Amino acid sequence: MDEETKLMEGFVEAEYQASVIRYAKAIPVADALKSDYAAAVLKASRMWRLKDQGGVPFLPIYDEMTEAHLQQRDRLLKRRIFKASRYDLPALGRVVLFAVGNTDNRYACDSYFQRFGVGETDKGMRIMSDYSVCVDCCGVGCQTCAGGWIFVRGRVIKLLGEPLEIHRLDEVEDEKYAAAHALDV
Ligand SMILES: [Zn+2]
């Protein structure tokens, strides 16, 4: 899963750098498209293909930094990558699912927050699905979710059978999510 993991690590880094640039200074609206922020977003976008979304969405651009921006800047985190699970699926072929944390240190930065699916798309290997963790069952599966996760956007991934390979890349610190982290899915 080295290639997929490298892509996910690259995305997490690029996404973080884009946010750091965005919240470091005001970017005049007139300059937005030729700013270093736009370049950083483009870099992250090259790893992302969620069906109709070719790129990573721009965060709002403002002419001046506000107190809210400064607070946001102080909360930024690079996502942690907790678990990678490789599947071979009839509809999609080889897919690796990555359980990751949040980018805002107020919420779920030390535990499961989202799950991204990485696989082959018409643009090559990309992030092609986005699920959020079910907060009712903390990722173990319940009646309101499909196996602990709720579809957000991109390709729907129907899991059949066990994963072929699992790598636990980081420890989950929030005990509520330890059960999901221990599952072999
Ligand atoms: Zn659930």
Image: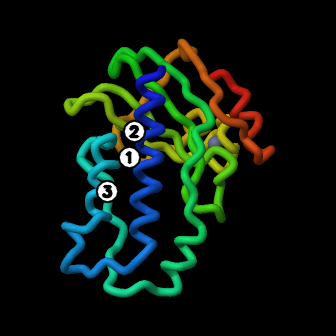
Q: Earlier in the sequence, mark 3 or mark 2?
A: 3
Vertical placement of 94 versus 108: above or below? Answer: above
Residue 94 position within the rendered picture, expressed as x and y whole percent measured from the top left: 39, 18
Residue 164 position by quadrant: top right
Measure the alpha-carbon separation of dots 3 and 2: 18 Å
Q: Nearer the viewer, mark 3 or mark 2?
A: 3
Q: Is mark 3 within 8 Å of ligand 1?
A: no
User: Circle 2 sits in a helix, a strand or a loop, which is it?
Assistant: strand
Q: Residue at x 52, y 34 (%)?
A: 98
Residue 119 vs residue 144, the one in the foreground? 119
Are the residues flagged by discs 1 and 3 in contact, CB closer than 8 Å? no
Q: Nearer the viewer, mark 1 or mark 3?
A: 3
Q: Earlier in the sequence, mark 1 or mark 3?
A: 3
Residue bearing mark 1? 153
Residue 24 position by quadrant: bottom left
Measure the alpha-carbon separation of dots 1 and 3: 19 Å
Q: Residue at x 40, y 77 (%)?
A: 25
Q: Which mark is residue 81?
A: none
Q: Which mark is residue 129?
A: 2
Residue bearing mark 3? 41
Q: What quarter of the picture does the C terminus occupy?
A: top right
Residue 8 position within the rendered picture, expressed as x and y whole percent measured from the top left: 45, 37
Q: Residues within 10 Å of mark 1 (few under 14, many from 20)?
A: some
Residue type pointed to by label 1 = Arg
Total labels drawn: 3
Q: Residues within 10 Å of mark 2 (few under 14, many from 20)?
A: many
Q: Residue at x 24, y 72 (%)?
A: 32
Residue type pointed to by label 3 = Val
Residue type pointed to by label 2 = Ser
Are the residues flagged by discs 1 and 2 in contact, CB closer than 8 Å? yes
